[in-house]
Image (spheres, rainbow, N blue to C red):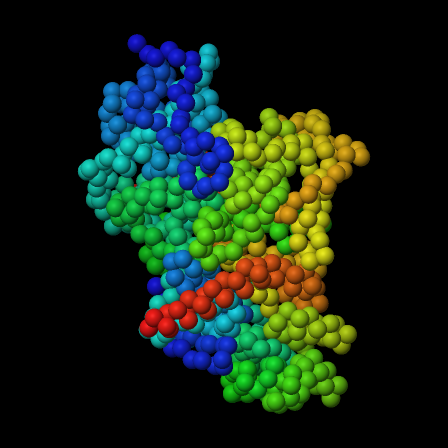
Amino acid sequence: MFCIKEKHILNPTVTKMVIDAPLVAKKAQAGQFIILRVDEEGERIPLTIADYDRENGTITIIFQIVGATTKRLNNLEEGDFICDFVGPLGKAAEVEGFKKVAVIGGGVGCAIAYPTAKALKENGAEVHTVAGFRNRDLVILEEEFKAVSDKFVMVTDDGSYGEKGLVTDALRKLVESGEKYDEVIAIGPLVMMKFVSLLTKELGIKTIVSMNPIMIDGTGMCGGCRLTVGGEMKFACVDGPDFDGHLVDFDEAMRRSSIYKETERHRYEESCNLFKEDKNNG
Amino acid sequence: MANMAPKKNEMPVQAPDIRNKNFSEVALGYTKEQAIDEAQRCLACKHKPCVSGCPVSIDIPGFIAKVAQGDFEGAYEVIYKQSSLPAVCGRVCPQERQCESKCVRGIKGEPVAIGRLERFVADWHIANATEKVNAMPKQNGKKVAVIGSGPSGLTCAGDLAKMGYSVTIFEALHTAGGVLVYGIPEFRLPKDIVKREIENLKTLGVEIVTNAVIGKTLTVDELFDMGFEAVFIGSGAGLPRFMNIPGESLNGVYSANEFLTRTNLMKAYKEDSWTPIMHAKRVAVVGGGNVAMDAARSAKRLGADDVYIVYRRSMEEMPARREEVEHAEEEGIIFKTLNNPVEIIGNEQSFVNGIKCVKMELGEPDESGRRSPVVKEGSEYVLDVDAVIMSIGTSPNPLIRSTTDGLDTDRRGCIITKDETGLTSREGVYAGGDAVTGAATVILAMGAGKASAKAIDEYLKNK
């Protein structure tokens, strides 16, 4: 059992939890993920490590409440326990040897982009961050990003905060203003990573994306997380989660991510109703 | 005088058209009377040919004689000397290719039903034993780490614990049992039985740490740093293989590992499970092994109307256990042998709606001795299905080999062992089961775990 040491509501749909998991914290690196199971009956879901504290033996996770399991996870409070928590899984992000890197985070993807930005900074890179959100209410980690970025650009779809526009607009502007990046790291919704990769291909900048497909075991057994990268089949859990954005077949990944959409929606509504009942009874 | 009936006592089973709609165990096991009657068919041959067919060398005539006398607990003790998991083996061993294939009674008629008797004895013990056979052995103070809690790991751990070693098993998943819990379905091997066998090991002092991925959470070298003096790697088969044909990324294409893990480990067959699975109406399972049979029969039970086994060779070459093939046929699984998929076809939403196959014919024998299938020209056709389950084997998991310096693997990625002791290229590191052989059977993995336990004991005694 793994204790929830802290819980913070970052915005109405995004929650941060600090979990007591010393063995995972000892090894965790930016870009890696964990798999958790909320309780005995729960499904296994992968979440990228948002931060780690080796001394205190904790792992920070930041998750968006999108389905039944994240809803149930969000229902737990400080001092509660998570049944299973395993990791660190996947390969670590490459953060050494860069002079200047643009880190692009989209929505809750910022939670994954942040530890990578931080690690890049610690390894001596100049870090420019572009963080994109739908609107002001959904903004997370602004202060944290600012602390590790030499340049920070905030964009929102509706212009309610920072510049109005998409992350691709902001990145194009930076490059057109003369910034030269060794690499772009894009982490966010599949569609965002797809368009960042298309842009950087045009601009000729190497791009790494972090894939987050459906997984079960996360250790290289089920093959559910398979992707096509450069025409070859890859398993995100052991070969990734980071891949060359110019080689990933995003359209296929988007189709595969929607396979259980109907079931998930159904389960999500069911779990919402359950909580409603709980509230009524309580 | 032995019972000279030419045929085995039939084992009671759930009727096919009832069982193909539920996940309860198919075979119901012998009654006491049936077991004694069957045991009396054994001729108690002096040279015990059956024992040579058993990968863990159970004293088969010895335990059968006890059954014939009605001493079932005595029979259990004989089996338990060699096997830590009798209730499992009695259910999943391919006896027709092992012990039973050597039985003298099989020359004229059917061999003694050794597997069914083993199962009976193990189940009788579970239901009736009052005192624990396996009292905690005297500890010798030496620590051994076992990676993986599948058949090889459990056997190795059990044998070492019986010798007095303090054994810790590291399991990557949240539940112990390996393929016995994520792979083999409830209707063939009830999970309660696996659980009980594992509880048995715990009474021997074996500790099980779940959620520990060796190669990630901890490395083999760190295990030595933690004071373990020897390590056994029984990490299992690994990454599922695909055919490399178009359409394998469509929605509705599963590896057998994923389909079975969702169904068994994550209990997607239960109404209230949180783990989703597609309830397809027409399913093609590609492959002819036990895993393919398990996947096909699970798909049927999840509500499919038509389930096909698509296999490129003929019925004779099919590697699955005979009984599984027969059970599958009885349950209405349709066998498309000498058929090979060339493409999976999807609809506009990228969900599977067909599998394009070609017909095959058998040509000359290949290096494995099996006649290799050759495509029949112009035989292409499309089978209408809405899910495809690929069950064509696995390739070894990279996590341990890529994080353990000096651990030699072959070009496929399987761990290389020096001999049958399972010793690897690293001192004190032994390996067995599918991690060494590639996908094989439960009992072969158990045999390997057993041999390594013996070798580890000798190594640590002389160290």
Q: Which of B416 and A224 is in front in this view?
A: A224
Q: Residue A218, percent across and down?
A: 51, 58
* Residue at 68%, 84% in the rendered image: A165
Q: Residue furthest left?
A: B131
* Residue at 50%, 72% in the rendered image: A65
- Res. A246 visible in picture: yes
- Quadrant holding the N terminus of chain B: top left
Residue B233 in the image: above or below residue B447: below
- Res. A148 visible in picture: no
Report the number of numbered marks.
Answer: 0
Using the rendered view, name the quadrant where residue B6 is placed.
Answer: top left
Q: Residue A206, percent across and down?
A: 69, 72
Using the rendered view, name the quadrant where residue B186 is placed.
Answer: top left
Q: Residue A254, percent across and down?
A: 65, 64
Residue A208 in the image: above or below residue A141: above
Q: Is residue B242 left or right of residue A86?
A: right
Q: Residue furthest front?
A: A280
Q: Residue furthest right?
A: B378
Q: Residue B187, percent across and down?
A: 44, 39
